[in-house]
Image: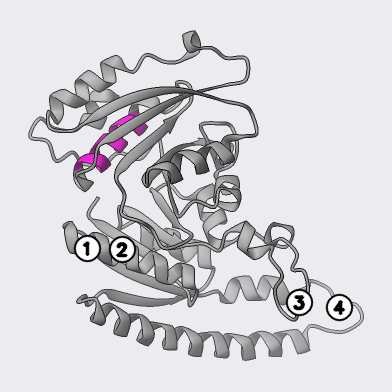
């Protein structure tokens, strides 16, 4: 839980994510690595075509080379700007400029880190009028954002930051059903303990489900309290209707400045939320300041002298 990787660009959302990381570093024993990727592969995918049609590929190759040169220059400028801003906050973060496929490069760096942090321009803001009074197409009609794509594939916790974050007052784990329950619960306990925040587990049921369908959390809570007697833990039971998860998430997150944690499970090569939807939908539509996606197969090292709660839960 001590190594953060910040994937950043020049956006306001990336600045919000960086400031959140610096705030965490001031109060907790964390180290921060900042990474900017020159997405030369993604640019080529945009410009490339396999066979000549109305024209050959030569102009596109030249355009790719010229644009990559500009993107490298922008990347170098961003590194300088980031390091200057970090210095103002009292930090000398490691700052890295990579080139290649943006998603792949972040995934490579994430292997040596505990949590990946990324800024994201929310759908509501992106769909507002932009550029000369013209209505912009929603981004999902053209491509996934970096945050949306990472949420689908990454096997490390992913913290998505969309706006300036108020100080978190608690960690709220949203669970639905049995899949990944024990490991995500253990991860949320370790996270809450590390941050020094109380933990709330929102045990959710949908549609025609009833209270009787909810998993019993009492054993997990008792075990967590045995590991961390000082940690305040409470459970709630709440009903949501299918296809209303994002609105419910926003309500839960905004009412008391909680860090909302949504478990994700591996399914057919991509990640799904425990609600059966892809996590990029939460990134796109929730609009909350921050949201943490927690892979259920990710195990953290416990700070308890009794060993790993995740191992005990498994």
At x 74% / y 58%, what residue is drawn?
141
Question: In the rendered structure, which segment of residues is drawn in magenta?
Answer: 183-193
Spatial CA distance of label 1 from label 2 is 6 Å
State how far apart marks 3 and 1 are (Cα): 41 Å
Q: Nearer the viewer, mark 1 or mark 4?
A: 1
| Lower position in the chain sequence, tag 3 or tag 1 | 1
Query: Where is mark 1, residue-wise?
Result: 25
Asked if residue 207 is positioned above or below residue 142 in the image, the reply reads: above
Q: Earlier in the sequence, mark 4 or mark 3?
A: 4
Q: Which residue is mark 3?
A: 133
Image location (x, y in percent) of residue 260: 41, 42
Residue at 21% in and 19% down: 222
Q: State whether the magenta stretch is mostly helix, strand or loop.
A: helix
- Residue occupied by mark 2: 21
**Where is mark 4, residue-wise?**
52
* Rendered location of residue 251, percent (x, y): 50, 40
Query: Quick one: label 2 or label 3, which is nearer the N terminus?
Result: 2
């Amino acid at each position: 839980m001590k190594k953060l990787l910040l994937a950043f660009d020049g956006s306001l959302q990336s600045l919000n994510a960086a400031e959140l990381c610096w705030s965490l570093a001031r109060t907790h024993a964390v180290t921060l690595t900042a990474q900017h990727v020159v997405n030369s592969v993604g640019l080529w995918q945009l410009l490339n075509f396999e066979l000549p049609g109305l024209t050959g590929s030569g102009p596109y190759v030249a355009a790719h080379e010229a644009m990559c040169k500009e993107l490298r220059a922008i990347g170098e400028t961003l590194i300088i700007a980031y390091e200057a801003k970090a210095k103002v906050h009292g930090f000398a973060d490691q700052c890295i400029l990579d080139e290649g496929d943006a998603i792949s490069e972040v995934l490579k760096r994430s292997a040596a880190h505990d949590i990946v942090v990324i800024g994201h321009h929310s759908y509501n803001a992106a769909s507002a009028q932009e550029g000369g009074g013209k209505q912009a197409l929603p981004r999902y009609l053209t491509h996934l954002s970096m945050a949306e794509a990472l949420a689908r594939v990454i096997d490390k916790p992913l913290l998505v930051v969309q706006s300036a974050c108020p100080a978190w007052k608690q960690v709220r784990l949203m669970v639905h059903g049995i899949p990944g329950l024990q490991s995500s619960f253990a991860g949320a306990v370790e996270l809450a303990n590390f941050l020094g925040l109380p933990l709330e587990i929102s045990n959710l049921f949908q549609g025609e489900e009833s209270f009787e369908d909810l998993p019993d959390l009492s054993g997990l809570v008792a075990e967590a309290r045995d590991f961390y007697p000082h940690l305040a833990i409470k459970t709630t039971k709440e009903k949501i209707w299918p296809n209303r998860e994002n609105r419910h998430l926003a309500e839960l997150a905004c009412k008391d400045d909680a860090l909302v944690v949504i478990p994700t499970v591996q399914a057919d090569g991509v990640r799904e939320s425990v609600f059966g939807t892809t996590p990029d939908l939460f990134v796109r539509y929730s609009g909350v300041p921050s949201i943490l996606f927690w892979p259920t197969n990710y195990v953290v090292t416990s700070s308890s002298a009794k060993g790993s709660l995740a191992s005990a839960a498994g």
